[in-house]
Image (spheres, rainbow, N blue to C red):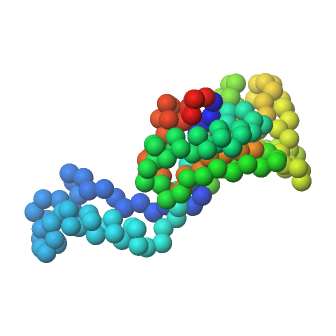
């Protein structure tokens, strides 16, 4: 079983979609762009997005158990499955490390909560725990009591909004162009 982790390492600029109350719809569109119809305009925007530097979007799939390392055949199978659900991705691959690493969500980070009671964990406290847990051999993922309810959890167990986690191996897609993964897609069953 895998957990889906979707970090966007830098914030990707978005171009607003045309809506019913957009100034570029209907008659006003043809007034503003008399030489182009809506389809040509949208193609122009798409071409601009492809040719101008924008940040990259990444989806990481990591094992639910952070210490699991799959063999190359299993990882290649996961890459193949990922290619089937993200055929337009710029790049899909995997990496394996001899130590636990943190896979973060970059600029999408919102909050961290206790998985037992849902209380918000302050970022300063979490950073202190990250520092305590890290050594030159990677993260140790020590269970520690939560200040909110006393439950014992590792850094990996915490409820991150956007998803993040710790792993020794990961499958990653760069610019997958698929949006959020469904639960079925992120499960990557044992047969993949």
Q: Quadrant of residue 121?
A: top right
Task: Tell me: 40 left or right of 61.
Answer: left
Residue farthest to the front, as pictured: 73
Q: Is residue 111 above or below residue 65?
A: below
Q: Is residue 129 above or below residue 2?
A: below
Residue 11 seen: no
Residue farthest to the left, as pictured: 27
On the image, the x and y values in percent for residue 15 come to 37, 61
Which of the image's four quarters has the C terminus? top right
Residue at 53%, 61% (x, y): give it. 56
Q: Is residue 125 above or below residue 93?
A: above
On the image, the x and y values in percent for residue 19 come to 24, 52
Residue 76 seen: yes
Residue at 88%, 50% (x, y): give it. 137
Q: Quadrant of residue 78?
A: top right
Count every numbered label the image shows and give the total: 0
Residue at 71%, 40% (x, y): give it. 71
Task: Tell me: 107 left or right of 64.
Answer: left
Residue at 71%, 38% (x, y): give it. 70
On the image, the x and y values in percent for residue 124 come to 76, 48
On the image, the x and y values in percent for residue 122 come to 72, 43
Who is closer to the viewer here, 71 or 86? 71
Q: Quadrant of residue 37?
A: bottom left
Which of the image's four quarters has the N terminus? top right
């Amino acid at each position: 079983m895998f957990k889906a982790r979707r970090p966007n390492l830098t914030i990707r600029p978005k171009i607003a979609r045309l809506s019913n109350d957009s100034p570029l719809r209907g008659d006003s569109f043809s007034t503003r762009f008399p030489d182009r119809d809506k389809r040509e305009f949208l193609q122009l925007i798409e071409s601009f997005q492809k040719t101008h530097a924008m940040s990259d979007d990444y989806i990481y799939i990591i094992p639910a158990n952070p210490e699991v390392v799959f063999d190359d055949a299993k990882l290649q199978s996961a890459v193949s499955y990922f290619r089937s659900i993200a055929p337009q991705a710029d790049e899909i691959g995997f990496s394996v490390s001899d130590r636990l690493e943190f896979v973060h969500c970059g600029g999408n980070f919102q909050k961290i909560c206790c998985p037992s009671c849902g209380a918000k964990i302050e970022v300063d406290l979490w950073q202190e725990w990250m520092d305590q847990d890290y050594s030159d051999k990677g993260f140790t993922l020590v269970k520690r009591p939560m200040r909110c309810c006393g439950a014992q959890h590792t850094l990996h167990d915490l409820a991150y909004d956007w998803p993040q986690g710790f792993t020794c191996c990961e499958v990653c897609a760069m610019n997958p162009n698929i949006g959020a993964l469904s639960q079925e897609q992120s499960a990557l069953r044992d047969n993949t």
